[in-house]
Structures are given as C-alpha cells and as structure tokens.
Image: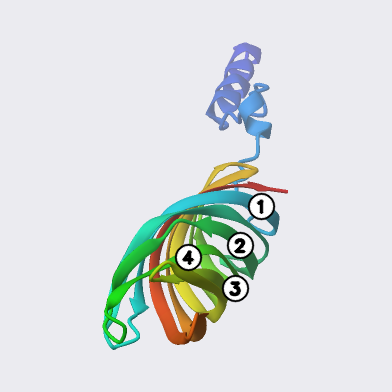
C-alpha cells in the first residue's frame, strides 16, 4: 500500500486545524493600536469675552435697599494647570455695566439713583474635568466704580469687595471653549459727597454670564 498520499492528507489536516491569525493573512487591522478616547487638555493660557445680566441691591442711606439691574459685558483671561481631572488656576476679568436703579432717600426726601459703570476681579479657579466638560468654582477679590446721583448732583466712588461663583465650561474645539457662569459679589460701603450731604452706600450683586474664549 502506498502510504505517501495518506501522509500528505495528515499534514494538510494538521495545517487546517491550526488557528488562523490575522497577521498570517496580512490583515491591516492587526497592526492597528487602539489608543482609547482622546483627553482634552485644559492646561495653558486663555482669553475671551463675555456678556451677561446683573441684579444689584444698593443700600438705602435711611435703611433697607433699592434694586437695580442691567446688562454687563467685558473680557477675561487666565491660566490653567491640570493634574489628571483636577484643573486649577488664576483668572482676571474687566468689564462695563449699565446696571442702574433708583429709590427714595428718606433722609432728604428726594429721589436717589445709583449705577455701576465698570468692574473687575482677580480670582482663583478650581474644577473637575469630565471631557469635554469642566465644572468649576471660583472666588477672589472684586472692584467696581459706581456713580450716585441725588437731586441732580452726583459723585463717584470705587468699591472693593469679594466674589464667589460657579459654572460649566465646554471645549468646542481644541482651542475654543464656551462657558456659563453664576457670580455673587458683595461690595463694601463707600461715602459719596454730594454738595453738603455725605451718603454711605454699599451693595451686593448677582450675575449670570456667558463667555467664549480662545486657548493658546
């Protein structure tokens, strides 16, 4: 009996029983490496602009408060550092305001008007990144220039205070981010000298801001 054909059949069967590897057939997918989802990097400098709405409660010289509101707008810039999901840094902003309100100065019996014209702040920020979202909190020092008018005469003063807030920021592109932010600010009282009358007034403010920034 010729055993050569039987031997060839056994070798062929053994070859078919061996697992076929993608690399053996030259599958290009076998050499592709899955790096996983890309992680957005928040670290680095950035700058942008914002618009928003503010509501303020000014101290009435005779007690109580009177309300003011209006739109605000300005620019902001900062620098972020990042450690895994933790993002932290410093940010500054400066803006203009048309927040205005009026009441009755009971001590003089005439209308009183107070308006915020310009403001700024220097703050620390800390947040947690959930790509492509950053949830953050912020706190720091604030400054504002206001004008008070009484019976046709006016005076201006610079108020110092503190501010706290929180917001959500989203990465729209590698170098473009957008945000929405709430801020509460408390400003100390300042004296306004209007003719022969000195009026002391401070105020607190609530604001909602939307911003768009470039990351460098």
Q: Where, by quadrant of the figure, is residue 125 drawn?
A: bottom right
Mark 2 or mark 1: which comes first in sequence? 1
70 or 199: nearer the eye? 199
Q: Where, by quadrant of the figure, is residue 11 drawn?
A: top right
Any mark on residue 93, and which? 2
Mark pair 2, 1: CA separation:
10 Å
Residue 79 locus on image (x, y percent): 69, 63
Mark 3 or mark 2, which is nearer to you? 2
Mark 3 or mark 1: which comes first in sequence? 1
The residue that disc 4 covers is 116
The residue that disc 3 covers is 123
- Disc 3 element: strand
Could you tell me how many numbered marks the image carries?
Answer: 4
- Disc 2 element: strand
- Disc 4 element: strand
Other residues around mark 1 within 10 Å, as few (<14) / some (14–19) / many (≥20): many
152 or 80: nearer the eye? 152
Residue 162 locus on image (x, y percent): 51, 80
Mark 4 or mark 2, which is nearer to you? 4
The residue that disc 1 covers is 47
Mark pair 1, 4: CA separation:
24 Å
Other residues around mark 3 within 10 Å, as few (<14) / some (14–19) / many (≥20): some
Asked if disc 3 and disc 4 are in contact, CB closer than 8 Å, the reply is: no
Mark pair 4, 2: CA separation:
16 Å
Mark 4 or mark 2: which comes first in sequence? 2
Mark 3 or mark 2: which comes first in sequence? 2
Mark pair 3, 1: CA separation:
14 Å
Asked if residue 104 is positioned above or below residue 40 in the image, the reply reads: below
Q: Residue at x 26, y 83 (%)?
A: 106
Any mark on residue 27, and which? none
């Amino acid at each position: 009996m010729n055993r050569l054909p039987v031997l060839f059949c056994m070798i062929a069967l053994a070859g078919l029983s061996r697992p076929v590897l993608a690399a053996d057939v030259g599958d290009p997918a076998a050499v592709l490496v899955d790096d996983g989802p890309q992680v957005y990097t928040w670290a680095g400098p950035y700058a942008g602009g914002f618009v928003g709405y503010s509501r303020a409660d000014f101290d009435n010289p005779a007690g109580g408060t009177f309300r003011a509101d209006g739109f605000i707008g300005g620019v902001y810039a900062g620098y972020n550092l990042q450690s895994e999901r933790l993002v932290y840094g410093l940010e500054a902003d400066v803006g203009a305001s048309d927040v205005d309100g009026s009441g009755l100065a009971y001590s003089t019996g005439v209308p009183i008007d107070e308006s915020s014209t310009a403001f700024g702040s220097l703050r620390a920020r800390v947040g947690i990144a959930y790509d492509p979202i950053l949830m953050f909190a912020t706190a720091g020092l604030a400054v504002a220039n206001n004008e008070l008018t009484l019976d046709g005469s006016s005076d201006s003063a610079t108020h110092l205070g503190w501010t706290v807030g929180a917001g959500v920021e989203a990465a729209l592109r590698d170098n473009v981010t957008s945000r929405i932010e709430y801020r509460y600010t408390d400003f100390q009282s300042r004296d306004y000298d209007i003719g022969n009358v000195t009026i002391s007034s401070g105020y607190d403010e609530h604001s909602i801001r939307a911003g768009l920034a470039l990351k460098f």
